[in-house]
Amino acid sequence: MRLIDVAVLTLAGALVGRLHFQSALADAAPIHAVLLYFCSGFAFLLFPQLGIYRSWRGRPLTAMFLQLGGAWALVLLLGVVFSFLIHHVGALSRLWVVYWYVAGLLLLVGCRVGVYLGLQRLRRNGMNSKRVLIVGYGAIGQEMHKRASQQDWYGYDVKAIHGEAHDLQQIKDNRITRIPTLDGVPVHAVGHHIDEIWITLPMSAANQLRELQYLLRNALIDIRWMPDTLSMQMLSNRMIDFLGFPAVDLNQPVASGPGGVFKDLFDKLFALAALLVLSPVFALIGLAIKVSSPGPVFFRQPRLGLNGKKFMVYKFRSMRLHEERGQVLQATRNDPRITPLGHFLRRTSLDELPQFLNVLIGDMSVVGPRPHALQHNERYKEVLELYMLRHRVKPGITGWAQIHGYRGETDTVDKMAMRVQFDLHYIRHWSLWMDVRIIAWTAIRGWSGKNAY
């Protein structure tokens, strides 16, 4: 592959040179031929150091292609720096460099796709496969076995499994060897020419992991550990480097880091645009509230925001002034506290519009879990195990749960549990595109519904 890559890059540079200069590259300024051979040779030396030739098995193609594009860009950048150092950068055609990068990357990717498809065909026919032994047959072990079986183009053939007796009973394939004890793992691996061992034991099985480490101390094969973090029911299991040690973030939302910056910027711009466009609607609703019933235009109530920080949520007042008497009661169907205008505002969700002010201030997001009254938080956090994880992100005006019908009154624990389930799905799988879809769905169908009252 290294030799193919050098040939491909040299060919790409020569072809775009002929197209760009309308002649052979040798007829252009000498720096172009010098750069052609310098970068092609440098790619031969640098690509292996950048991990370009690691095994493709089990890796997503998009990640590999991004890595390849970055490596080729680095080589070309070093080539341009070299031309600067020898004082010939002025004669270098910038367009030729850009064309060479694009053409080189397309040919590099094309060659890999061809090789990848060829290997897929071989592996589907049982060739070029690796024999695998799985240690631990819980949720992760079973999922890994299923993926290895269904995605046969990766070329992993599960030959043996060690697990608890009740887990081993779920194995339907009689060709797979069941290993009842840990002592049998290294014996089977050596005796049956196993290529890889996948350890999927849960982190709670510390004693077994230590014993397995000792038993496999002399095993000269690839060993992979995939900890069973799914059983922990947390938001994430992202591996990071922390103070020089590998660490796993268990409840870090996806919308943190660079993604969170983009989300926050999107929220601010969207809220500002919404407030400017809807300002006439605000004025009309405010005037109607003042005329229809005595009291303020806005309703303010404390809620929990990001990481449990309290803030005051704003809504258009839809109820008559009344005493809460230390208990916050959710609005119910035909609630006598709601004014006639309030029924309309709540039914159409127009009472939520002032929360764009909360978004602009920074207490809320356009999309996120809906904020609940403080008393409801105190109640449900003791009943639902993962309830408070909703507050690891900013609350939103609309959300994944709301567009799926889980809005309005939550008069049973089951209703709240379903809402929390949808909220956690949103937090775990967030993307900017997901936010756009939720906003579009809310704008089209989400402003009213049978549960809005």
Image (cartoon, grey):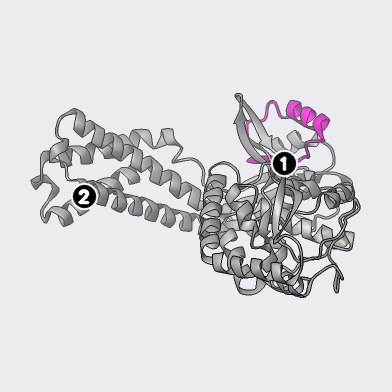
Using the image, determine if residue 291 lies above or below residue 231. below
Q: Is residue 351 left or right of residue 47?
A: right
Residue 443, image x and y in percent? 60, 70
Q: Is residue 141 left or right of residue 24?
A: right
Q: In this view, does 443 lie to the left or right of 298?
A: left
Using the image, determine if residue 216 lies above or below residue 349. above
Residue that badge 1 annotates: 309
Q: Could one spot residue 137 in this view of the protein?
A: no
- Label 1 vs label 2: CA separation? 53 Å
Relative depth, front residue between 266 and 75: 266
Badge 1: few (under 14), some or many (20 or more) residues near its Cα, within 10 Å? few
Identify the amino acid type marked 1.
Answer: Lys
Kindly indicate the quadrant of the structure image that contains residue 403.
bottom right
Which stretch is magenta? 195-221
Residue 37, image x and y in percent? 22, 38
- Name the disc covering residue 95, or none: 2
Relative depth, front residue between 277 and 150: 277
For the N terminus, which image quadrant? top left
Using the image, determine if residue 415 lies above or below residue 197. below
Residue 118, image x and y in percent? 46, 57
